[in-house]
Image: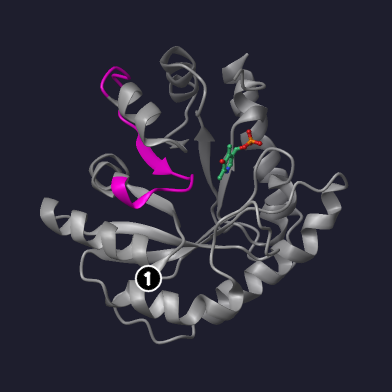
Amino acid sequence: MIAENFHQVMAEIEAAKARRTRVLKDAPVQLVAVTKNHDVAAMREAIDAGATDVGENRIQEAMGKYDVLDRDVTWHLIGHLQTNKAKYAVKYFSLIHSVDTPHLARALDKEAGKLGKVQDVLVQVNLAKEASKSGVYKEDLRPMLELVDSLPHLHLVGLMCIAPNYEDVEACRPLFHEMYEIFQKVKEIPLPASNIKYLSMGMTHDYRIAVEEGANIVRVGTAIFGPRQY
Ligand SMILES: *Cc1c(COP(=O)(O)O)cnc(C)c1O
């Protein structure tokens, strides 16, 4: 089932790419299979079906799986990170999507430095200004990007956002549209140490629209693995 679902999501991404109007139709999209709350057996099924990238939102859970997974895969941290877990985040994850405060950025920089690593990160934007979500407001984005750019052990590679869980999924479209515009504008800001190339947006209910509007990383869990059991 997981393999079939994975192939289905990949096909949906290709179909959404073909519907793009403002973005090059063949510009690639990276699927991150969101494995939080799913076990290692489920992860292996997805990886054996072709998943190259997995996303986790809790450090503790990811660390437990990391040692037993026994597959080569790229790890993405997609959830809010507490500063006191920064040292684990830089150890386990290739890309951290959820850098949302100067305090966290500095902590990650320090811990990456201790490992002699330059950590790829995205800055999370709270475009809809939802109180329940973290992320930088668009008004505050530029100084945040300049800060991250200046930190020697962080490598800023783009932006991430989470759309509100609208009942009518089309309501996400203007947000994704605006996010893509912000992404394009950010590429114009002088950020000499950065490479603004990723726009991570879209989850199970809205990834098709996100791809149509210019996402090049989508984070999909439920459509691949089924509902999470808590
Ligand atoms: C859980 C999660 C996802 C995946 O959600 P689904 O609806 O299961 O696809 C994507 N992004 C973030 C930040 C998440 O926490």
Say whether residue 74 is magenta: yes
Relative placement, left or right, of 207 versus 69 is right
Which residue, as the protein is rendered here, is positioned at the far right? Answer: 168
Examine the residues drawn in magenta and state their main secondary structure: loop
Mark 1, residue position: 195
Q: Position of residue 83 (x, y in %)?
A: 33, 52
Element type where label 1 sits in the image: loop
Would you call the spot at circle 1 few (<14 residues within 10 Å), some (14-19), or many (20 or more)? Answer: some
- 137 is higher (above) or lower (below) than 207: below
Q: Position of residue 213 (x, y in %)?
A: 70, 61
Q: Nearer the viewer, residue 51 or 149?
A: 149
* Image quadrant containing the N terminus: top right
Q: Nearer the viewer, residue 126 or 155?
A: 126
- 151 is higher (above) or lower (below) than 6: below
Disc 1 marks a residue whose amino acid type is Asn
Q: Position of residue 71 (x, y in %)?
A: 31, 23
- Residue at (35%, 39%) from the top-left corner? 74
Q: Nearer the viewer, residue 110 or 160?
A: 110
- 39 is higher (above) or lower (below) than 83: above
Say whether residue 70 is magenta: yes
The part of the image, by quadrant, that contains residue 203 is top right
Relative placement, left or right, of 123 versus 59 is right
Q: Tell me which segment is drawn in magenta.
A: 67-84
Q: Position of residue 225 (x, y in %)?
A: 60, 22
Q: Decide if ligand 1 comes within 8 Å of the CB at mark 1.
A: no
- Residue at (72%, 44%) from the top-left corner? 15
